[in-house]
Image: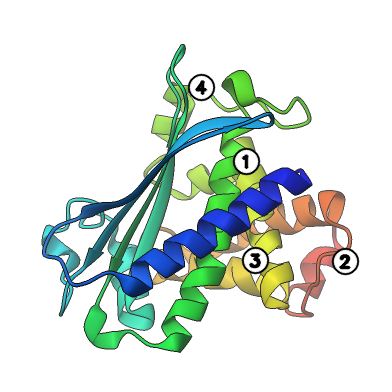
Amino acid sequence: MSPEMESLAKTLTQLIVSTAHDAGTTSEYINAQEIEITEPFLDVDFRFLLKKQPNLDLSNDSHFSKMKWQYLNLEKNAYVLTGNVFMTDGNIPELEIVIAIDPNRESSTMYKKLYYKLLNTISHELNHLNQKGWNRDYDNVVPSNMNIRKSNGNGHGYFLLPEEIESMVKGMYHQSKAQNIPIDVLFTQHLQPFVDSGFMSQNEMIKIIEKWISHSLKYYPFAKMSNKYQHIIDNI
């Protein structure tokens, strides 16, 4: 990711955290920020959807109800977030960040965690924008076609798609640097809720981590690693 894209990721992260912190409670999602970003290195329409609902319940949530792993994230963190990019031929790409927060559990610690996770997510999504269309960075992989993405969308195979490996590791690398913790620790933290919610098995998680570590060693040789997966590193 170029220095300009890194700077944009940090700017958007700070904007979102500040906006979320200052917002009042809502029963529905509000369009908290909407910006048309036009830079020499990127054209994208950005929007931030926010809900701050006391005693937040995801079971009827329009964005998170089907994401069972997010129920665990909410219980642990007091917030849930997701990011998406929408790219249609001939149109300016769109970057959307969605966050739901339980204001009864807000704290400075929560917002610090949110900052780091957001930096990860936005870096991830900005990288997707560099994989396709007029913003494409030709050093990046070519995304899988929609049939492949759909067939892998309901299982661990999604995390092994070339474009997802590239974007997920890039996002976690930027979080790892900012938070000063080993990148493989973030791999485990990110994937464990998928295991605990039944979306994937423990063995499937390890297969993903093997691929992510291999990608990290190749493209981010200075990434900080713990010794938890040293046996994987030794066999790459």
Which mark, by number, is residue 127? 1
Q: Which residue is mark 2?
A: 234
Q: Secondary structure at mark 3?
A: helix
Q: Secondary structure at mark 1?
A: helix
Q: Horizontal and vertical percent for residue 148?
A: 48, 27
As drawn, which residue projects farthest toward the top?
A: 90
Of label 2 and label 3, which has the lower sequence position? 3
- Residue at image position (68%, 31%) is 41
Q: Amino acid at mark 4?
A: Asn
Between the C-alphas of marks 2 and 3, the distance is 25 Å
Q: Which residue is mark 4?
A: 145
Q: Nearer the viewer, residue 64 or 144?
A: 64
Please say if 80 is above or below 48: below
Examine the image and state in which quarter residue 136 appears.
Answer: top right
Of label 3 and label 1, which has the lower sequence position? 1
Between the C-alphas of marks 2 and 4, the distance is 33 Å
Q: Nearer the viewer, residue 155 or 222?
A: 222
Q: Amino acid at mark 1?
A: Asn
Between the C-alphas of marks 3 and 1, the distance is 14 Å
